[in-house]
Image: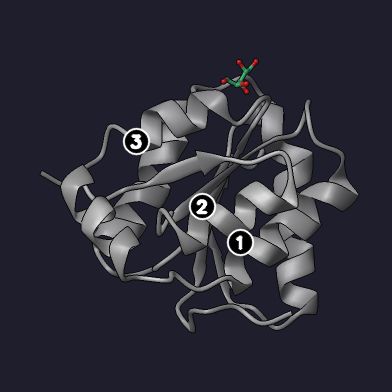
Amino acid sequence: MNSITNKPVAVACDHGGLQLAGAILAHLEENNIPAEFYGTHTAESCDYPDFAVQVTDAVTSGKSELGILVCGTGIGMSIAANKVRGIRAAVCGDTFSAEMTRRHNNANVLCLGQRVTGEGLALKIADIFLESPFEGGRHATRVEKLEK
Ligand code: RB5
């Protein structure tokens, strides 16, 4: 697979997403996609907003164009990430949504739930998210309205 960005994919998780985040990092490495991992590094209970902000900082600063956040459901991470101006985070549990949220919403953060989505499907969702371009046009007008 190829990513639409040459910048490192920013990845973070809480304890509920630790295993899937590890699988995603290994998968990106196998595919020569650069990644930056911001933790958490252990199974010790932690607070997902503390890790969501690492990825949103990476994206809003321009260090990364795309990020992936993993928690138990993906929902806490998405709520946290979407509080940040310029972040468009989408929880995806299927490949169609992953493609459409890139093509239509220009989503820049993918949120996954380790306790919801099996690893094989989650890796495919990540691939499609990273490969799919934003279509622009009428969708750009709508995305611009999100930022106002
Ligand atoms: C942690 O138990 C869990 O609440 C967290 O990973 C996430 O699912 C929150 O949305």
Q: Is residue 94 left or right of residue 49?
A: right
Between residue 128 and residue 143, name the one nearer to us.
Answer: 143
In the rendered view of the protein, which quadrant contains the C terminus? top left
Contact flag, marks 3 and 1 (Cβ < 8 Å)? no
* Amino acid type at mark 3: Asn
Q: Reading the chain from its start, which is encountered first: label 2 or label 3? A: 3
Q: Reading the chain from its start, which is encountered first: label 2 or label 1? A: 2
For label 1, the SS is helix
For label 3, the SS is loop
> Relative to residue 95, is residue 83 depicted above or below?
above
Q: Is residue 123 left or right of residue 38?
A: right
Q: Is residue 109 left or right of residue 27?
A: left
Residue 29 point in image, percent of width and height: 73, 74
- Residue ID for mark 3: 82
* Amino acid type at mark 1: Phe
Q: Which mark is residue 101?
A: 2
- Residue ID for mark 1: 129
Q: Is residue 79 visible?
A: yes
Residue 115 point in image, percent of width and height: 78, 26
State the residue at coordinates (56%, 55%): 100
Contact flag, marks 2 and 1 (Cβ < 8 Å)? yes
Give the Cα distance between marks 3 and 1.
17 Å
Q: Nearer the viewer, mark 2 or mark 3?
A: 2
Quadrant where ligand 1 appears = top right
State the residue at coordinates (38%, 29%): 80
Between residue 48 and residue 86, name the one nearer to us.
Answer: 86
* Amino acid type at mark 2: Thr
Bin the neighbour count of mark 2 within 10 Å (Cα to Cα): few under 14, some 14-19, many 20 and up: many
State the residue at coordinates (50%, 73%): 133
Q: Is residue 145 left or right of residue 50?
A: left
